[in-house]
Image (cartoon, rainbow, N blue to C red):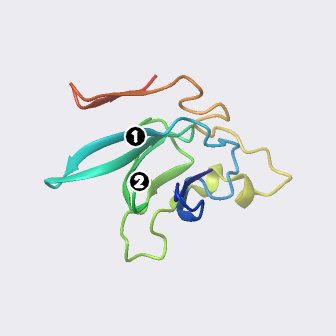
């Protein structure tokens, strides 16, 4: 459940971002990373966009690892309400898990039901794409 960047010259870790800490629902985070160059606030940026099985789409500056977008792309997602985007918060970048759907919070002897998406996720292995012509992402 981690996006991990290395320096290609040294092999040293540059940054990482964990999408679903503790991954209680087995989403795995195996989907592709789409690399684009786009303007944000009038500045050219090298970006990484990832549509995760967990139902959230993430866009990051792939040079610095700065989290720019973390939003639900599936409106039925209920395991978390949002990802905190305030860099001043101690919860910055973390999903806000809904206790009712948390297998960890409900305990090992509780069958947690109604979690959306299910373990296969909102998007599984079918690849998404970006069109520079339309400036849209296409996500199956």
Q: Looking at this view, is 59 or 9 the one in front?
A: 9
Residue farthest along the front direction in this orientation: 9
Query: Image point 67% across, 53% down: which residue?
Result: 102
Query: Image point 39% across, 58% down: which residue?
Result: 63
Q: Quadrant for residue 131, please give it.
A: top left
Q: Where in the figure is residue 37, as x and y percent of width and height? A: 29, 43
Q: Where in the figure is residue 56, as x and y percent of width and height? A: 47, 44
Query: Image point 21% across, 26% down: which residue?
Result: 134
Residues at marks 1 and 2, CA–CA distance in whole angstroms: 8 Å
Q: Which residue is mark 2?
A: 62
Q: Where in the figure is residue 25, as x and y percent of width and height? A: 69, 45
Q: Quadrant for residue 117, please give it.
A: top right
35 left or right of 3 in image: left
Residue farthest along the right direction in this orientation: 109
Q: Quadrant for residue 119, please give it.
A: top right
Label 2: element kind: loop
Q: Marks 2 and 1: in contact by CB < 8 Å?
A: yes
Q: Where in the figure is residue 15, as x and y percent of width and height? A: 51, 63
Q: How many marks?
A: 2
Circle on res. 61: none
At label 1, counting other C-alpha atoms closer than 10 Å, the crowd grade (few under 14, some 14-19, many 20 or more) is: some
On screen, residue 61 above or below 34: below
Residue farthest along the left direction in this orientation: 42
At label 2, counting other C-alpha atoms closer than 10 Å, the crowd grade (few under 14, some 14-19, many 20 or more) is: many
Q: Looking at this view, is 40 or 95 the one in front?
A: 40
Which tag, 1 or 2, sits closer to the chain's start? 1
Circle on res. 35: 1
On screen, residue 36 above or below 22: above
Label 1: element kind: strand
26 left or right of 83 in image: right
On screen, residue 122 above or below 77: above
């Amino acid at each position: 459940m981690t996006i991990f960047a290395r320096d290609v010259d040294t092999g040293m870790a540059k940054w990482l971002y964990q999408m679903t800490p503790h991954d209680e629902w087995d989403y795995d985070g195996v989907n592709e990373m789409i690399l684009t160059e786009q303007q944000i606030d009038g500045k050219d940026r090298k970006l990484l966009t990832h549509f995760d099985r967990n139902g959230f789409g993430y866009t990051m500056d792939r040079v610095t690892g700065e989290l720019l977008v973390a939003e639900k792309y599936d409106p039925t997602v209920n395991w978390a309400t949002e990802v905190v985007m305030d860099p001043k918060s101690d919860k910055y970048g973390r999903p806000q898990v809904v206790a009712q759907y948390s297998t960890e919070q409900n305990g090992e002897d509780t069958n947690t039901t109604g979690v959306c998406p299910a373990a296969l996720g909102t998007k599984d292995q079918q690849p998404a794409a970006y069109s520079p012509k339309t400036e849209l992402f296409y996500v199956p």
